[in-house]
Image (cartoon, rainbow, N blue to C red):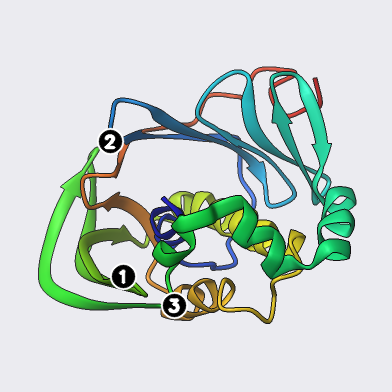
Amino acid sequence: MVHKLILAAAVVLTVPAWADVTAVYAMAGGDQLRVEYRDAANFRIGMGADNYQLMLGGHLYAVAEGQVIDVEKISRQIRAVGADTFLAGLLGDATSDVPTEVSVRPLGRQETVAGYQGEVYEALTRTSNGEQRAELVVTDNAELQAVQDALMKVAKEAVAAVGAKSSPYAKPLEQVEQQRLGGLLRYGEDLRLVSLDHEPIAGGRIALP
């Protein structure tokens, strides 16, 4: 799952502000990933009502079953025990599936997803278990680029929270960021845009519980 989330965070690009945007992605297995974006410092990302990430005024929180976790505060505790030690304990055997390198190449064709046309690439992810390949469809739509910005911010802050900026865990994020491809429409069969809504986000959605 780690490499999927990293590739889902495709590229950071600076874009102008606008009205609220909500992007919904279908995930393998039937779950949905929902990104409710107001601006670069205020958004909500989650797959359900009880568990989500919340960026408020540029400060990241994780909400789990009604409990609020201040990511910056908990990161100090994690760094105290050692980032790599913590990650190894958390991920266990899954550390072998953490990407060490991410690269993409254009396939020379286009695909329309949820009404948006995008360019198709092949994403190659290398881990200690070998190589994994998947198609990646991205678009230059500014709103989806902003959604992608939000996904990347959360991914980067998660890595920074465990003090792993200089570890191999940060390298794939840097590589993906450098690609500057655009906003994600589809990643293999694991993530596919379902809708992009411009209705105002309901009050209380981008706020601490």
Q: Amino acid at mark 3?
A: Thr
Q: Position of residue 109 (x, y in %)?
A: 9, 67
Residue at x-position 88% and y-position 63%: 80
Q: Earlier in the sequence, mark 1 or mark 2?
A: 2
Q: Is residue 68 visible?
A: yes
**Residue tagged 1:** 129
Q: Quadrant of residue 149?
A: bottom right
Q: Is residue 16 visible?
A: no
Q: Amino acid at mark 2?
A: Ala
Q: Are marks 1 and 2 in contact (CB under 8 Å)?
A: no
* Residue 53 located left or right of residue 186: right
Any mark on residue 28, and which? 2
Q: Secondary structure at mark 1?
A: loop
Any mark on residue 100, and which? 3
Q: Is residue 48 above or below residue 77?
A: above
> Quick one: 92 or 62, which is closer to the camera?
92
* Residue 38 located left or right of residue 143: right
Q: Is residue 179 above or below residue 147?
A: below
Q: Position of residue 111 (x, y in %)?
A: 14, 54
Q: Earlier in the sequence, mark 3 or mark 2?
A: 2
